[in-house]
Amino acid sequence: MAKVTIDGRVIEVPDGITILQAARMIGPEVAPPTMCYHSKLKTSGGYCRTCLVEVTKGSEKDPRPMPKLVASCRTNVMDGMEVGNLSSPKVIEARKSVVEFLLLNHPLDCPICDQAGECHLQDLSYGHGSSKTRTDFERRTFEKISIGEKIQLHMTRCILCYRCVKVAEQITDGRVHGVINRGDHSEISTYIEQAIDNDFSGNMIDVCPVGALTDKTFRFKSRVWFTKPVLAHRNCEKCSGNVNLWFKGDEVLRVTGRKDQWGEVEEFICNTCRYDKKVTSDWTVEGPSPVNRHSVISANHYEVFTKPTEFKLNDVKPLAIQEGDKS
């Protein structure tokens, strides 16, 4: 076990885990934000640099601080390590610069983007970004292509987190897309249009932290804060069948995988559950989905309903007024 201090909070964690994992064990108040890391995907992380932290003490054996900020998703903890996240001015300034870099070529599509309201980049820019830009040059654009029958690609919104590539590589039966070209010309694409058709390809939509990959069957149908997410399950031969159903009235607008408090998919689901089962009778509804109270989706969303205490009229007793209290 290793004893680690993060933003003044001390915790003992197993050897070999990363600073990010240790911070998440403490809680969201000290956990760095992430855009590319996903705990269910091997080799993810280390691309976006949003989880940079300052190591002010390396370990008990070598207390020297690390000379530069490090990616918490790629740096393992050591006994006696002291880490600064929100308590470090260096980290706050560096994270602000990282957000500015991510938004450098990102279009202002929030009013029309289906990801609006559940976009990690929106949360990141609101919490750590600047209120104005320092650039006025033309942003990069890409030719629009179709990569699948059910998946819409908006390459101008992509931040190259590589999550969708790793999903296709590790979850599906064959990856047919990836990052092509280099540098500023890098893009997610396939060399043959409409080539993505395997049975777990829809999970690329769930892991995308921005609106680069969206569901064509849900396209422009509703804003997420007008929908009601509920937990549901069904017996499926291909996947676990545990999903979120997004209702608007009695209509199921979309089906997605369940996500944890970090916005990561808990269990990947098949395309049959995602696209072909959009009738309430296909599912066993368990109850409202847990939604972070800071999310816009939480508006008018009640997870637990507590029935008022029942009482009889004759049980109500008048308030006792003390002498001298005439008010």
Image (tube, helix red, strand yellow):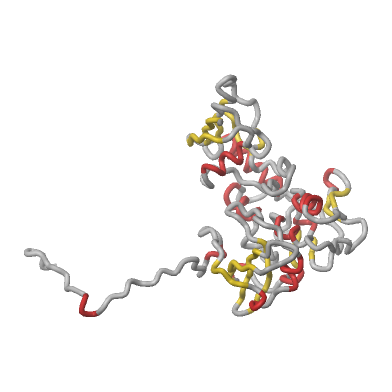
- Where does the C terminus fall, quadrant-wise? bottom left
Quadrant assignment, res 71: top right
Frontmost residue, 42 versus 103: 42
Residue at 80 percent of width and 61 percent of height: 153
Outermost residue, left direction?
323
Image location (x, y in percent) of residue 135: 72, 48
User: Which quadrant is home to the N terminus?
Assistant: top right
- Specify whether residue 321 is in view: yes
Q: Is residue 173 above or below residue 150?
A: above
Q: Quadrant of residue 14?
A: top right
Residue situated furthest right in the rendering: 192
Asked which quadrant contains residue 258, the reply is bottom right
Front residue of this view, candidates 125 and 175: 175
Q: Residue 178, how many percent across, how many down?
A: 85, 51
Seen in the image, is 218 located left or right of residue 305? right
Q: Is residue 29 left or right of residue 269?
A: left
Q: Would residue 139 be seen by someone viewing this image from the given angle?
A: no
Q: How many marks?
A: 0
In this picture, residue 43 sits left or right of residue 229: right
Q: Position of residue 160 (x, y in %)?
A: 77, 49
State the residue at coordinates (59%, 71%): 285
Say whether residue 276 is left or right of residue 251: right
Residue 167 or residue 223, whichever sits in front: 167
Q: Is residue 222 above or below residue 97?
A: below
